[in-house]
Amino acid sequence: MSLDLAETVGERLQRLREEKGLDVDQVSSGLISPEMLLLVENNMGYPSKRVLATLATRLGVTVDYFHETANKMRKRRVWEQIGNSIIIEGRKGILFQHTYFPRQWLFGGDIVLADTMNEAVSKLSQHARLMDFFAKTDYWLPVDWKAIEKRHLPSLRMKGTGDKIYKHRLEIDLWRWNDFVCYALTYEEWYQTVMRELVAKLRSLA
């Protein structure tokens, strides 16, 4: 069995699954949803220790087989660096563009939706000025899953994960879940967008 230390946990799971000729439904059955496994395989989610241990058993390896890649997994390979470091409102950093959803741009913890790099930089600059004005540093505010689930069904929270939903501090209709960002006015609209865009994209890559 090959061992590529450059692989992420997700890439290693996918390779092992494909080597054994198994589909996502077979590997995830009774543990997590197939959609969650696709998220993990595409570096957009991370399984709990219990889930990873069970997946390892199903794929015929020990959980130690994945430990070498845990830190790489957390760095997320879904973002592609765009050029060298830039300065936005006095902040020096790297601009990234989402690999699967190119309208998403990441810089210094902020994520904006834009069609072009210039539009993205303009939005990021505006956000940075407002954050300075309000003396804030955290762009994202966590949304309480339990509070949402009391009023809404279905939920995208997966058993055995620590997934969180966030809303942007400045753009209150901008939601983030793992590495997926979209506009939505309600939880139902957000859910429908995630199911339509994110899950469809990941299934096309499976």
Image: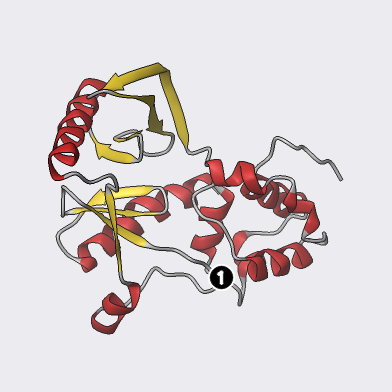
Q: Which colour scheme is used?
A: secondary structure
Quarter location, residue 150: bottom left
Indicate the position of residue 203 as horizontal and vertical percent values: 48, 52
Q: Which residue lies furthest to the front in this view?
A: 135
Indicate the position of residue 136 as horizontal and vertical percent values: 22, 46
Q: Vertical placement of 30 versus 48: above or below?
A: below
Which residue is under mark 1? 32
Q: Which residue lies furthest to the top in this view?
A: 84
- Which residue is at the front of the view, 39 or 195? 39
Q: Vertical placement of 172 versus 8: above or below?
A: below
Tell me if 48 is positioned left or right of 53 in this view: left
- Is label 1 in a helix, a strand or a loop? loop
Residues packed near mark 1 inside 10 Å, few (<14), some (14 to 19) or many (20 plus): some
- Which residue is at the front of the view, 36 or 82? 82
Q: Which residue lies furthest to the bottom in this view?
A: 150
Which quadrant would the N terminus be assigned to in this image? top right
Q: Residue at x 81, y 41 (%)?
A: 3
Quarter location, residue 132: top left
Indicate the position of residue 38 as horizontal and vertical percent values: 54, 55
Q: Vertical placement of 144 versus 181: above or below?
A: below
Give the amino acid at mark 1.
Ile
- Which residue is at the front of the view, 126 or 13? 126
Q: Can residue 127 be seen in this view?
A: yes
